[in-house]
Amino acid sequence: MVRAIYEIIEEISPYYKKRTEDKKKGIIDSVSESSHKLTYESYSETLEPVYYFIIDLMNEFSHPPEKLVDNFTGTPGSNQSSELMLKGSRMIEEASKIMQTVGILTKSILQIIYDLRDFKIRLQSYDTLKSSKKEEREATLLSLKQIWLDKVDILKGGSAIKVLYGQVGFQTLFDAFMIVNNEKDVDKLDLNDRIKRTIKPRIQEFNIWLASSEGELRKRYEMQRIYLKSQVNSLKLYSRWAKPYLKAAQDLQQKDQGRNPSIVTTFNRVVLELTLLGKSEIKVDEAALEGSLPSDFYKSSSLKGKRKYYSCVLVDFVFTAVPTQGNYIGKVEVTFRGYALNEDEIKKLDEELGKSDVGDALSFIEGATGENLALLQKEIDDYLNEKDKPTSSASKTSDTSNPFLALIGHYNKKEKTDDKKSKNGEKKEIVVKPDDWIEKEHIRKLAAEKALKVSFNIFDIYKKSHGMPSYT
């Protein structure tokens, strides 16, 4: 089962972690988190109105909710369970078809990168020919001659230099070819005429090849770069197409309820777990003007750099329902909790949700790429942005997005500019620092008091609106 969100909060927040320890010791603070629970059961009305009524109340109290947990488990004998499993299998089938194409494109990208690497090594030889150092030029020329002998001249068959080299009378042919650079140099050699007649046309052919092969190689290199870009774009497209199917298949997967007595094999029951978090920022200046905080806090320089604090309402729903014609009837248990969290604690909460079972859908999709593919991104960027390196303005407009991150919906999110990263480019783990005196004694307490009040009001209004006894 998914770890409860309130347990994560009490673990990551130094403030609430200490409060939990104090509770065990019997020490209770004057301001504590609230916890109110209500149960609604009806087999004549659907349960959805309960959920949406509470969402409306949270919006009315300026705590717009976001969904953190959405799990379901159906008994094996329920109609809903078999229907959702069938839908999930269809999603997997569609995703597998797209993923096959993704695999083919990935292999193609790998091969293109290997080809570009070979081309780049060859082109470095041509660049070295223009070096001001004589030793480098001579070594490079010998290397290119060897390539010509292995790739071009060898096609002549029995008349190839390497073939003739092993015959009687041609033992000096290979060395002579490697020494001379043009036809005039051949006449200066102290060799017989047969060797000279053989070398002259070959050295002429080599020089022609040397002049034309560089341009041809650079052209092929550019064509491969363009092809790489098209394959990368195709991979991004197919990856984005696969992502919704993979995500839907994972969402339709049932969660393990362990020994929950509500889950009986032959019963027609569904257990739904939902968690909402609504938060409202504490405006220090406004609170100081209203008198909720000391008046000295109004536009005070001592508050610069302080973390933002939020009044948070956490609402847990547990539906034990009977599915009927697309609706649900049965029982719902709703628990309201109030917390005061700062911006670091909220970021840490998001980070922990990504690690826990709450984020298992994203980890499932991310696993489809593998870490080894992500390592290729640097090489892809090097080749695609090669021409853009000299000018900073061009590099800003170049496409440096990662095709493998498209699988996890990375580009569907707004890019955050304040994310702290380590030297190797990976995100640093968020460390939540304890409150200082001002934060703990004033801002945190104000946020906690507001959270207590709002969570109780939502709970109380719902009870009164449904004719339940008022809370005392």
Image: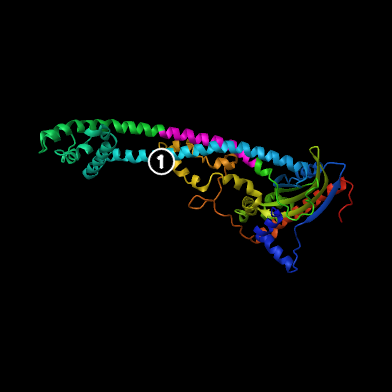
In the rendered view, would you say 457 is above or below 11?
A: above
Q: Which residue is mark 1?
A: 114
Camera-nearest residue between 16 and 88: 88
Residue 297 inside the magenta-drawn segment: no
> Residue 422's spot in the image, x, y percent?
51, 53
In the rendered view, would you say 326 is above or below 451?
A: above
Along the horizontal axis of the image, is 131 left or right of 447?
A: left
In the rendered view, would you say 3 is above or below 140?
A: below
Question: Few, some or many C-alpha atoms within 10 Å of disc 1 (few <14, some 14-19, many ≥20)?
Answer: few
The mark total stands at 1
Camera-nearest residue between 147 and 405: 147
- Give the residue at x 47% y 43%: 377
- Give the residue at x 41% y 34%: 224
Residue 131 appears in which quarter of the rendering? top left
Q: Secondary structure at mark 1?
A: helix
| Residue 30 in view in this figure | yes
User: Which quarter of the figure is the C terminus placed in?
Assistant: bottom right
Q: Which residues are magenta?
A: 224-247
Q: Main secondary structure of the magenta part?
A: helix
Along the horizontal axis of the image, is 29 left or right of 156?
A: right
> Residue 60's spot in the image, x, y percent?
77, 43
Q: Amino acid at mark 1?
A: Tyr
Residue 242 appears in which quarter of the rendering? top right
For this orientation, the residue located farthest to the bottom is 25
> Residue 352's spot in the image, x, y percent?
63, 53
Camera-nearest residue between 61 and 363: 363
